[in-house]
Image (cartoon, rainbow, N blue to C red):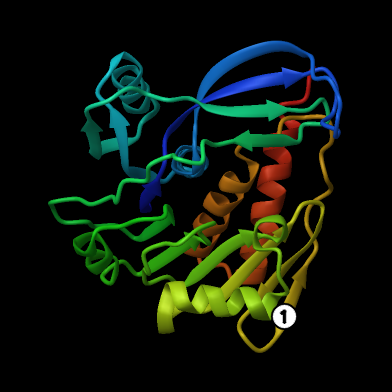
């Protein structure tokens, strides 16, 4: 069994199911509102668990009723939670607007405080995945000994970390591959092998600083929530790499896995 270290957030997502799509000047109505566990670390870890990996989480939760309940849920799901830090404070939900089409919009407070993650013991795994801004230096140093490291490209100033693959979306990157590659190299250093750019239902671009490879994604699934789909893609991509696939094959396999997952959420 592959052991993967997942370094990233576990949030409490408060999802507003909208009755109509977002538009400037419009009036929003919602049918239901519900709260679930979410976050980049959570969704990527769930996908890896679904594929049969042993997953250890490096994240932080608040030591309140919601945080303790989340820890219990993570344990029951099968996560290794020995590296989950419990911090004083109150759990603040992340607001997500979900349109009828399945597209989501995340509302995050501008003053949201990001805490640097760290651990005080050995970190052993076949691979690591990162979706986090800040890391303490001891944790960064431990990543050098992990054979395969995949990182999401952070949306803000972030701690450099060694990584073999950087994953992001066209919407988040908002640049041509060459420009995103330069940002990825600044983040991952000389270890970087490949940039993976997803683009919704359009081609996935793999870029190594010189040449681009286009990978056709699986057929799009409409009318179902896309919350967590990008994070799950990263988990499936990493698992395929661990299974010996080349990057192009891994991207195609991951796309199909996520399409099948989305299709499984369609109303019966």
Q: In the structure shown, which secondary structural element does the residue marked by tag 1 occupy?
A: strand
Residue that sits furthest to the left in the current view: 121
State whether residue 82 is above or below residue 72: below
Find residue 52 and report its image quarter.
top left
Q: Quadrant of the C terminus?
A: top right
Residue that sits furthest to the bottom in the current view: 210
State whether residue 249 is above or below residue 119: below
Q: Which residue is drawn at 42% across and 70% down?
A: 163
Whole-percent x, y for residue 100 in the image: 82, 25
Q: Which residue is drawn at 36% across and 44% down?
A: 55
Residue that sits furthest to the top in the current view: 31
Whole-percent x, y for residue 107 in the image: 60, 34
Q: Which residue is drawn at 35% across and 56% down?
A: 134
State whether residue 53 is above or below residue 127: above
Whole-percent x, y for residue 3 in the image: 34, 52
Q: Tell whether 240 sits left or right of 85.
A: right
State whether residue 31 is above or below residue 113: above
Find residue 187 and report its image quarter.
bottom left
Q: Tell whether 71 sits left or right of 229.
A: left
Q: Which of 167 and 93 is in front in this view?
A: 93
Instruction: Mark 1: give few (<14), some (14-19) or many (20+) Cα within 10 Å.
Output: some
Q: Which residue is drawn at 82% across and 17% down?
A: 19
Q: How many numbered tags mark residues here?
A: 1
Whole-percent x, y for residue 253 in the image: 66, 56
- According to the image, label 1 marks what residue? 212
Q: Tell whether 142 sits left or right of 78.
A: left
Q: Tell whether 90 sits left or right of 170.
A: left
């Amino acid at each position: 069994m592959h052991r993967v270290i997942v370094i990233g957030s576990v949030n409490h997502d408060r999802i507003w199911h909208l009755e109509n799509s977002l538009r400037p000047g419009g009036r929003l109505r919602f049918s239901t509102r519900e709260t679930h566990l979410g976050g980049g670390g959570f969704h990527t870890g769930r996908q890896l668990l679904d594929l049969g990996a042993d997953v250890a989480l490096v994240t932080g939760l608040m030591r309140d009723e919601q945080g303790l309940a989340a820890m219990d849920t993570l344990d029951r799901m099968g996560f290794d939670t020995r590296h989950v830090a419990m911090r004083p404070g109150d759990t603040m939900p992340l607001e997500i607007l979900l349109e009828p089409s399945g597209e989501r919009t995340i509302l995050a407070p501008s003053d949201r405080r990001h805490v640097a993650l760290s651990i005080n013991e050995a970190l052993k795994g076949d691979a690591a995945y990162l979706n986090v801004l800040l890391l303490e230096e001891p944790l960064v140093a431990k990543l050098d000994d992990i054979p395969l490291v995949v990182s999401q490209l952070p949306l803000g100033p972030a701690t450099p970390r060694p990584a073999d693959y950087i994953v992001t979306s066209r919407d988040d990157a908002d640049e041509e591959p060459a420009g995103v590659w330069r940002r990825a190299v600044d983040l991952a250093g000389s270890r970087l092998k490949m940039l993976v750019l997803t683009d919704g239902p359009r081609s996935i671009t793999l870029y190594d600083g010189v040449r681009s490879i286009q990978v056709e994604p699986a057929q799009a699934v409409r009318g179902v929530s896309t919350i967590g789909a990008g994070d799950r893609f990263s988990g499936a991509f990493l698992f395929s790499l661990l299974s010996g696939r080349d990057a192009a094959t891994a991207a195609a396999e991951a796309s199909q896995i996520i399409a099948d997952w989305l299709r499984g959420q369609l109303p019966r």
